[in-house]
Amino acid sequence: MANRLACRGITATVGVAVLTLGAVACGGTGSTTADQAANVDCKPYKKYGDLSGKQITVYTSIVAPEDQPHINSYKPFEQCTGAKVVYEGSKEFEAQVVVRAKSGNAPDIAYVPQPGLLQTLVRDTKAVKPASKGVVDNVDKYFGKDWKSYGTVDGAFYAAPIGANVKSFVWYSPKQFAKKGYQVPQTWDDMIALSDQIVKDGGKPWCAGIGSGEATGWPATDWMEDVMLRMYGPDVYNQWVTHKIPFNDPKVAAVLAKVGSILKNPDYVNGGLGDVTSVASTTFQDAGLPILDGTCFLHRQASFYQANWPEGTKVGKDGDVYAFYLPPINKKFGKPVLGGGEFAVAFSDRPEVVAFQEFLSSPEWANLKAKEGNWISANTGLDIANVDTPVNKLSVQLLQDPNAVFRFDGSDLMPGEVGAGSFWTEMTNWIANNKPDKQVLNAIERSWPK
Amino acid sequence: MTATPDSLSRPRTARRVARTAQRAEQAKTRLSSPWATAISIAVAILWTVPTFGLLLSSFRPEQQIKTTGWWTFFSDPQLTLKNYTEVLFGGSTQLSTFFVNSIVITIPSVVIPITLALLAAYAFAWIDFRGRDFLFVAVFALQIVPIQVTLIPLLQTYVDLSLAGSYWTVWLSHSIFALPLAIFLLHNFMKDIPRSLVEAARVDGAGHVQIFFRVLLPLLVPAIAAFGIFQFLWVWNDLLVALTFAGGTQNVAPLTVRIAELSGTRGTAWHLLSAGAFVAMIVPLLVFLSLQRYFVRGLLAGSVKG
Amino acid sequence: MSWILDASTTGEKLLVMAFAIVLFAAVMAIILFAVDRPRRVPNWLIALAFCGPAGLMLGFGLIYPGLRTIYQSFFDRTSTGFVGVDNYLTIFTQEGFQIVLRNTFVWLLVVPLASTLIGLVYAVLVDRTRFEALAKGLIFLPMAISMVGAGIIWKFVYEFRPDQQGVHQIGLANQIRVWLGMDPHQFLITAPWNTFFLLIVMIWIQAGFAMTVLSAAIKAIPDDIVEAARIDGATGIRLFRHVTVPAIRPALVVVVTTIAMGTLKIFDIVRTMTGGQFGTSVVANEFYMQSFRQFNAGIGAALAVVLFILVIPIVIYNIRQLRLSEEIR
């Protein structure tokens, strides 16, 4: 297991140079320093100065084995500046980082996966340092305005966007589609027509699972967000996320009904997994797997779902599985893209920490990290040739597409009570206990902090 | 501390042997009820089967765990050690590092609170002082303070003392959290000791310190062993305290941190979770088995009764 | 001397550990030696020497944070604005929280009683049988597993697979249903029964604790009492009710109390198995979610205070038992 993710990345990599790097990561030793010593170009690192003997602590929610690519990606920085980066990952990151920051024991840099958590850290702990000029320049140059706004709290810019993912994907099996003669739908109506066709052919079109431990419910909130963007566009989406319109607004109700017409439709779900309530009990990791054996045909989940396919699954246009862009509903709003990502937050303004934060927001790092496999960024300096899998390439294209309207995962932007609380819980009740739409929305509205 | 005064225990051995024989006699009469046998076997099975299922699963290939129940093993036996190799050698850090950390964290976290609790329990049981009962009830009630509310204030203090991230904070914190229950339980054993024993020592001119070490401690060895196991299990299985005060770096992180990471970001990885759970259980089970005789004999040394 | 704070090799770690234990023993020895003067030192000073170190640690580590929590429960989410009893009103009036309170009561009523009863009956049944050690070991086994581990084990037991062709159950509970000709059931989803399926896990763990302590207490019953009762003709259940239970009453109180305290604090099991979803959350889990997921310090603190309040009846009961046993002594 430890090296499977890294190894899977390799099967799909293209360049020979990438292969070498990947192979080292696959060995799991992590000591690539020796191999790289010869070919690291230290020129881009000159501006950081000499940081010999300095130490930077990094704290993230990314644990073994996915941590190794991160650790590897710091190597050139360590080598050229002399600084040492100490990496620590924990599954309890979200609780621990706040506890540590409040107690004055914060790490130097933390990868914060939600803007909501960034707000908590900035407002409640007052321990976050504003981004340095170098970081601001990088972000202005290489990231879209919207990305910068997610790293901004109360008018001040703090956090450099680093990794990203695209959520507006529907996973399917090109093989099964070819066998049955199904086409990848281009519009929402096409997609519904396809679903009905599958039902007529005696199958269950959709499989879904919203189980995720204490975060159970989030995949259902992603559905809501994607459909909201497609029905009413990015502006109404912003109003909804910031509570300019109430959560039980008729528009939100229409979105929920639309989602329900798939997720709570006993004809459509839950392919290979059970009845409608099994959507609530199936973990999101397991939910797409029935696509492989043809008991299910469509599964809406983010780009990172590619890591969940079993070893040996071929991901690609003519492979076992692939993903298509969740089609638009209303042409007026173009091609909305829902996604997520993480941000590098600095708790210290020591020169070495400032330098490292700047490094993380630079295209040099984005390309280094992408070469380690299975990772993408919204950094426009990221060369698509360095991105490994087809789905990741597709994601980067969407992220860098000037016509696509990007919006960040709305539940991550809402206050914790809603975005990490009632929204999850109520969507779960909506499915597990068949709680009526109206009661669900009223309950979430009531929980919104005044 | 464990010097047993032989003078107290020797004459009793002969009597105990006789009594054991007598009890064996009684045992026969007791087991005669088929209902009793049936119930105890049923409970034992009920309590063992879930663990057994996971144990068996931990040796089955990943694909099999995901698609069939562990009982199919009996019709289609397939075993592998792959899950264990992945758990033991899969990470970038050797598992033995985490084992050492766990041991280094656990031993002082068991010894310190038990010593302190023994002394305090003695005072509550055998020294007369004003406000004794009130204080005892207060200590007892402290059991309910959820550990989570203490994390931030404690960590703030540790940071001020620049102790954060070291073993010292973990030992101190575990000791604090164990004290209320330890004092409560040990006090209950302590006050069951016949007053006559303590009085006799007092007449001989022994002070409290002497009475504590010479008279009470030897009698309490089984109770100490028993509570020691509970505290050991608690500390060994703890994740929250270690994560908060020591951090998750490999210099101090205990085994639980590694086990918690096992599932990676891929959710229900039953094959790794099952193997990991058993790796974590080995040491507690060994400790329990080696100290089990104390449970079988009773929590107070046999000398107390009769 | 940096290894004292920052041990990195195995040798250093063990050395620090030994150093800590020796240091601790030395400090305690000095304190005790200082008061070891029979009949000269006043009682309160001796009591201070015996209780002082523990008292200091409790004051620093539990009493101060506890008081701080009570204070915070009257403030808003960032502990800056005073809100009076608003947090408590929220807890007691919102529908979601009412379910949480209801579940906590169910746990508090069922787990201590069921674990104690099972532990007691089992202890009596296997007492002095040939397989006593093995039988006890089996029941004790779950104690050696962490709460998270136990959650994993039972989640595996309850695991659900749909009733479809070619799909096999992998959870034992559902397989048994299938063998009995029933449909597989989503044990962890259907409220309110899912709470019972969760608290079985806690009973499963705690019965071992109850059995251990009660068995020891049973063995401590003086033989002459049992003999006298036998001569009077008491056997089986009557002996159990009229001799065994009264004789181990103090131990029963200890066991019920300890398990009740542990049950109130339970959150790992709920968190591992359902994440508090599907109407299974309990106060301690909700406290964790509010404090560390939604970072609402006010509501979190108020929930912790609710835990303090729930303990009061247990404390009062124990005080009465304490008084009773004092009188006997």
Image (tube, rainbow, N blue to C red):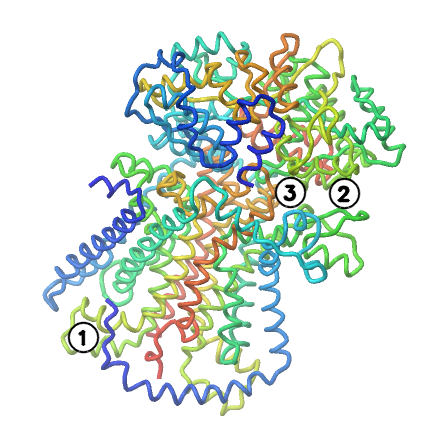
Q: Which residue is mark 2?
A: A274
Q: Chain of mark 2?
A: A
The quarter of the rendered structure image containing the C terminus of chain B is bottom left
Whether residue B103 is situated above or below residue B125 in the rendered picture? above
Q: Secondary structure at mark 3?
A: loop
Name the kind of residue labelled 2 in the image.
Answer: Gly
Packing grade of label 1 (10 A; few <14, some 14-19, many >=20) is some
Are both tags, 2 and 1, on one chain?
no
Label 3: how many Cα within 10 Å (few below 14, some 14–19, many 20+) = many
Measured in 3D between alpha carbons, the distance from the residue under mark 1 to the one under mark 3, in whole angstroms, is 61 Å
- Gap in Å between the C-alphas at discs 2 and 3? 18 Å
Callout in the foreground (2, 3): 2
Q: Which residue corresponds to mark 1? A: B202
C243 lies above or below C197: below
Mark 2 touching mark 3, by CB under 8 A? no
* Subunit of label 3: C
Secondary-structure class at tag 2: loop
- Asked if both marks, 2 and 3, belong to the same chain, the answer given is no
In whole angstroms, how far apart are the C-alphas of marks 2 and 1? Answer: 74 Å
- Residue A448: where, in percent of width, then height? 57, 26
C186 left or right, relative to A103: right
B73 sits to left or right of C76: right
Asked which quadrant contains residue A436, the reply is top right
Residue visible at 33% across and 78% down?
A: B304
Residue A57 location in percent, x, y? 37, 29
Give the amino acid type for the residue marked by disc 1 in the picture: Arg
- Mark 1 secondary-structure assignment: helix
The percent coordinates of residue A233 (x first, y second) are 68, 13
Q: Which mark is residue C278?
A: 3
